[in-house]
Structure formats: structure tokens, C-alpha cells
Image (tube, rainbow, N blue to C red):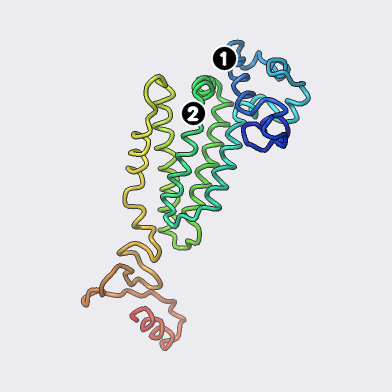
Amino acid sequence: MTAIGEAMTGNDSSGGRSAGPSTAEVVAAAVRLFTSHGYAATTMGDIAVDIGVSRRTLFRNYGSKEDLLFAEHEDVFETVQRYLSTSANTDRVAAVCEAARMVFASFVRAPEIAVPRYHLVRALPALRDREIAMTARYQRAFSRHLAAGETDETRLLICASCAASLIAAHNHVLRAWLRAPSGPLPWERFDTALEVVTEGIRDRLRVGGAAGSTQGGGRPTGEGEPDEDAVLVAVYPTRMEGAEVMRRVRQALQ
């Protein structure tokens, strides 16, 4: 990242003195102009004049008005990815919940950006499409982290469902706050929402699988011995030799 935006990310090399406005300052200026003059009527040149940089510099750093409007969330997404890739938390559900909190915090700590941008996005279909694409990136990142090392289709489905549910819970609480941002920050409601959608999933994703799940032919992986009256149903190709069928059945019963 070049001079613009360094103040926000802490990447400046000037001893803590930014050579230009931070990403948050640039986005705040853009949102203010979009709100007062209209998104279509505001140009990148208008924004450049407002923040005191050249139009060329603004284009080089942000590309377009749409890119600029969501610019700080590129930083947030990179932070979330780094957190998940380096997390020492063996509880994968807890790790993605913490990542969701990081995303939520990035909105509520900057209402001067988040609230007017919310109304802009609601009014412009192209911006809604961009927001949907951003949401999908977070969902994929959460799903990948939850599913790391998994191969069982049922467990992969649980991971994907959990990621989607976390995004839905995050957006549900966030949108309620964006519609009425003057009250207290809804952290308690947010944490409750995450608990609701992840209830029981931690146990099902424990190492070794959930009680009652099956591995390698159907034997339960829960604690204790299987029921003596349990029935094993095995299906094998008709062309398979009888000895091989019996070997596989004995292996499944071990």
C-alpha cells in the first residue's frame, strides 16, 4: 500500500507520520460527497480535491468510486485472513466467531462511514452486487477454515452451513444497528446470535467426529461399545471375489 491508506494500516515508514490521508479518511470523504451530491454526480476528481491529493494518485490507489467506497474492507478482509491462517485456536468454530466479531467491529467503530454507505448501497443495485460479492468472500474464508482437513461429506456440509449461518447472523444484527445506530452497540445481541447459529456445531466438529457419525464402513465413533444387536449393512460390487468381500466385512467389524 502506498502513501494513501498507510495511516490506517500502520504500514507507513515515516515514524508514525502518514504521508497522506488514511483509507478511513478517504472513504469518509467519499461517502460524505456521495451523500451530499449524489453517487453518480460525484467524480474521483471531486474526491481528490476534497482530500487534497491528485486525481492520478487517487486512481492509482483505489481504481474506481466503487473500489474506493469499500476500500477499508479490503484491509479488514486481509486482516481476517491473516488471523485465521495463523490462529492457534483448535476450536475452529470459536476462531471463525472471533473473525466475525472483527468484521462487525470494523462497521460499528466507524458509523460515519457505515451508516451512509448502508443507505447508498440500498439505493444502487451495482453497489448491492459489490456488497454481496464481499459477503461471499467472507463466507468462503470461514468455510475453508472450518473445513480444514475434512473429507467426510457430512462434515463438509456442516462446515459450509455453519459459515453461511455466521454470515446471516452477522448481517442480521448489523443491519438492525445500521437502521437505528443511535443506541448502544449491540455486542450482546451479536454474541447471542452467534451462539444461536453455532449451538451444537462445536461438538459435531470435534476431532474424531460427532457421536453417532460413521467412519470407514459405518461403525459409530461415539464413546462406548456399539450395541450388540446392531446390524451392519455392506454393499459391494457383484464382480468382487467372495474372499475380498469377507475381508472387508471383517475389517469393518473390527
**Viewer-closest of 131 and 72:** 72
Asked whether, in this view, residue 129 is left or right of residue 209, the answer is right
Quadrant position of the N terminus in the picture: top right
Q: Is residue 212 above or below residue 36?
A: below
Q: Amino acid at mark 2?
A: Arg
Instruction: Determine contact: label 2, label 1, CB under 8 Å.
Output: no
Q: Residue at x 47, y 61 (%)?
A: 150
Q: Is residue 222 above or below residue 134?
A: below
Residue at image mark 1 = 35
**Viewer-closest of 237 and 134:** 134
Secondary structure beneath disc 1? Answer: helix
Residue at image mark 2 = 109
Q: Position of residue 16 (x, y in %)?
A: 67, 33
Q: Amino acid at mark 1?
A: Thr
Q: Position of residue 91 (x, y in %)?
A: 42, 55
Q: Residue at x 57, y 34 (%)?
A: 73
Select label 2 or label 1 by which is in front.
Answer: 2
Asked whether, in this view, residue 26 is left or right of residue 3, the answer is left
Q: Position of residue 5 (x, y in %)?
A: 66, 31
Mark 1 is surrounded, within 10 Å at the Cα level, by few (under 14), some (14 to 19) or many (20 or more) other residues, namely some
Mark 2 is surrounded, within 10 Å at the Cα level, by few (under 14), some (14 to 19) or many (20 or more) other residues, namely few
